[in-house]
Image (cartoon, rainbow, N blue to C red):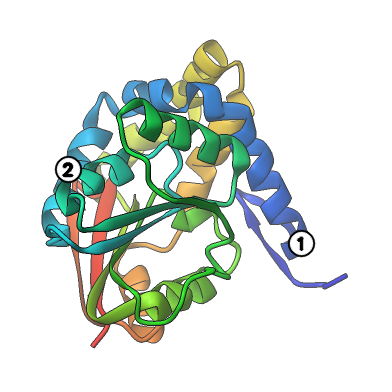
């Protein structure tokens, strides 16, 4: 048993416990995940993801890895981009979320590969994908540096990593954002998903996640080059992009 600790929201837990506790969160909210995404972002999560797709530069025939892809929003969009000659892998560590994503892909007519795996130990060869994406999943990972290095490893030279994640909101808006996050969000979670605690964790995990500049530095330390980022919705979300050169 390691004596190393990490954050689970504002709580300090042993590293071994975090993966289990995060799994409990997403198993609890999986059935209402898409509805809650629309409600809590007022539909803006669709705009953020669409922007990520456009910035990705993915073309017909490309290979794409969607890490922590959940209910497959990005995987679906990328599948339409890469066409029959390309390939998109949907992965997630959580079985309940991955099952929802797989069913959604099938319902939309896409028979594409899925894999339940830990982002810190990706079961793919070196230099394989043209693009790797992780949307709203990095902050839940115990060793973010290890996960970023793994995502870089599986990229081909010239490939790019996109990280779409909650970030640091424009400071004048912080009081209003805090009120929304810690009061309204758990209330909605209770009413819609019968789970206030999971959405309280969401608010806390956002505050513990690295801000724009810190995440940029982490990506550079993982070996990515030409790292830049785009603030979306006044910094509520940021899209980071880095290349494997």
Q: Which residue is mark 1?
A: 16
Q: Foreground residue, 52 or 157? A: 157
Crowdedness near tag 2: few (<14), some (14–19) or many (≥20) residues, C-alpha within 10 Å: some
* Residue 127 spot, x, y in % from top left: 35, 81
**Label annotation for residue 204:** none
> Could you tell whether 134 is left or right of 45 in the image?
right
Q: Nearer the viewer, mark 1 or mark 2?
A: 2
* Residue 203 spot, x, y in % from top left: 48, 39
Quadrant of the image occupied by residue 48: top left
Q: CA distance from mark 1 to mark 2?
A: 35 Å
**Label annotation for residue 50:** 2
Q: Is residue 10 above or below residue 105?
A: below
Q: Foreground residue, 130 or 183? A: 130
Q: Of marks 1 and 2, which one's residue comes earlier in the chain? A: 1
Does the residue at mark 1 contact the one at mark 2 (Cβ under 8 Å)? no
Q: Residue at x 26, y 54 (%)?
A: 238
Crowdedness near tag 1: few (<14), some (14–19) or many (≥20) residues, C-alpha within 10 Å: some
Q: Foreground residue, 167 or 157? A: 157
Callout 2 secondary element:
helix
* Residue 179 spot, x, y in % from top left: 41, 29
Callout 1 secondary element:
helix
Q: Quadrant of the N terminus?
A: bottom right
Q: Residue at x 24, y 50 (%)?
A: 235
Q: Quadrant of the C terminus?
A: bottom left
């Amino acid at each position: 048993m390691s004596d190393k600790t990490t954050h689970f929201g504002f709580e300090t837990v042993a590293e071994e416990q975090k993966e289990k506790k995060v799994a409990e969160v997403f198993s609890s909210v999986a059935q209402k995940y898409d509805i809650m995404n629309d409600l809590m972002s007022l539909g803006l999560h669709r705009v953020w993801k669409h922007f990520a797709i456009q910035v990705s530069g993915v073309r017909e025939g490309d290979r794409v890895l969607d890490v922590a892809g959940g209910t497959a929003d990005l995987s679906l969009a990328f599948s339409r981009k890469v066409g029959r000659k390309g390939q998109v892998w949907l992965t997630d560590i959580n079985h309940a979320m991955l099952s929802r994503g797989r069913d959604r892909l099938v319902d939309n007519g896409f028979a594409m590969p899925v894999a339940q795996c830990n982002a810190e130990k990706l079961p793919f060869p070196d230099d394989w994908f043209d693009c790797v994406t992780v949307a709203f999943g990095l902050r839940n990972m115990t060793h973010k540096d290890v996960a970023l290095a793994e995502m870089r490893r599986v990229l081909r030279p010239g490939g790019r990593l996109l990280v779409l994640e909650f970030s640091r909101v424009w400071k004048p808006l912080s009081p209003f954002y805090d009120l929304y996050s810690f009061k309204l969000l758990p209330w909605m979670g209770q009413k819609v998903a019968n789970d206030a605690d999971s959405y309280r964790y969401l608010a806390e995990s956002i505050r513990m996640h690295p801000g724009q500049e810190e995440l940029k530095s982490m990506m550079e330390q993982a070996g990515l080059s030409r790292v830049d980022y785009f603030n979306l919705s006044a910094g509520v979300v940021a899209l980071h992009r880095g290349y494997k050169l």
